[in-house]
């Protein structure tokens, strides 16, 4: 396989509807959590009385906490869905062509989709949590 073939197949994967859907869902969750974290910090006296975990935390730590909790929730729900509804497909060899058809497979299995979203949110949580305060 040449470099040109690899680049072409990578472009096909990145242009797939599945990757765009995953990116959109993660972006919406990230924007919503950022707004909540900023509002929580701006109204620190009110929010600290309601939720003690906001007390004296910078916005990136609050955002990291939210992303981790949501990522863990997505991952857990996805795992339960994936286990409860096993795939009817027979195992095949993993080839590049199988990777290109992963969009159809994940659309059929909502559990795998939720697991991928959960993993991305947890990784974002780790990245944002490691930023300097």
Image (spheres, grey):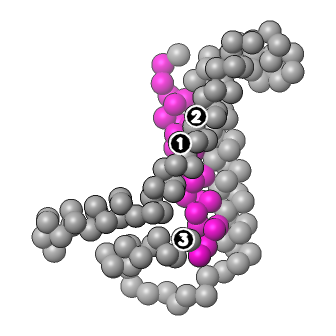
Tag nearer the camera, 3 or 1: 1
Q: Residue 15, position in %: x, y?
A: 36, 60
Instruction: Give the secondary structure at mark 1.
Output: helix
Separation of residues labelled 3 and 2 (CA atoms)? 25 Å
Look at 59% across and 76% down and name the residue there. Answer: 108
Residue 62 visible, this angle: no
Outermost bottom residue: 90
* Disc 2 packing (10 Å; few <14; some 14–19; many ≥20): few
Look at 80% across and 9% down and name the residue there. Answer: 45
3 or 2: tag closer to the N-terminus: 2
Residue at which label 1 appears: 27
Query: Magenta stretch: residue 60 in it?
Result: no
The circle on residue 80 is none
Query: Magenta stretch: residue 131 in it?
Result: yes
Q: Is residue 26 left or right of residue 85?
A: left
Q: Which quarter of the rendered picture does the N terminus lie within? A: bottom left
Separation of residues labelled 3 and 1 (CA atoms)? 19 Å
Q: Residue 104, position in %: x, y?
A: 49, 75
State yes or no: discs 3 and 1 in contact (Cβ < 8 Å): no
Magenta highlight range: 108-132
Residue 76 visible, this angle: yes
State yes or no: discs 3 and 2 in contact (Cβ < 8 Å): no
Q: Residue 17, position in %: x, y?
A: 45, 63
Look at 35% across and 59% down and name the residue there. Answer: 14
**Up-down relation of residue 80 to residue 42 (above or below):** below
Residue at which label 2 appears: 31
Tag nearer the camera, 3 or 2: 2
């Amino acid at each position: 396989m040449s470099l040109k073939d690899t680049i072409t197949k990578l472009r096909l994967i990145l242009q797939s509807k599945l990757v765009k859907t995953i990116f959109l869902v993660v972006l919406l969750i990230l924007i919503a959590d950022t707004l909540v974290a900023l509002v929580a910090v701006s109204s620190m006296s009110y929010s600290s009385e309601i939720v003690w975990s906001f007390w004296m935390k910078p916005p990136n730590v609050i955002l990291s906490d939210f992303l981790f909790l949501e990522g863990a929730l997505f991952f857990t729900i996805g795992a339960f869905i994936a286990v409860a509804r096993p795939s009817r497909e027979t195992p095949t060899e993993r080839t590049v062509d199988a990777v290109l058809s992963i969009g159809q497979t994940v659309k059929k299995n909502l559990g795998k989709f939720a697991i991928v979203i959960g993993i991305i949110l947890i990784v974002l949580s780790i990245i944002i949590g490691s930023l300097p305060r």
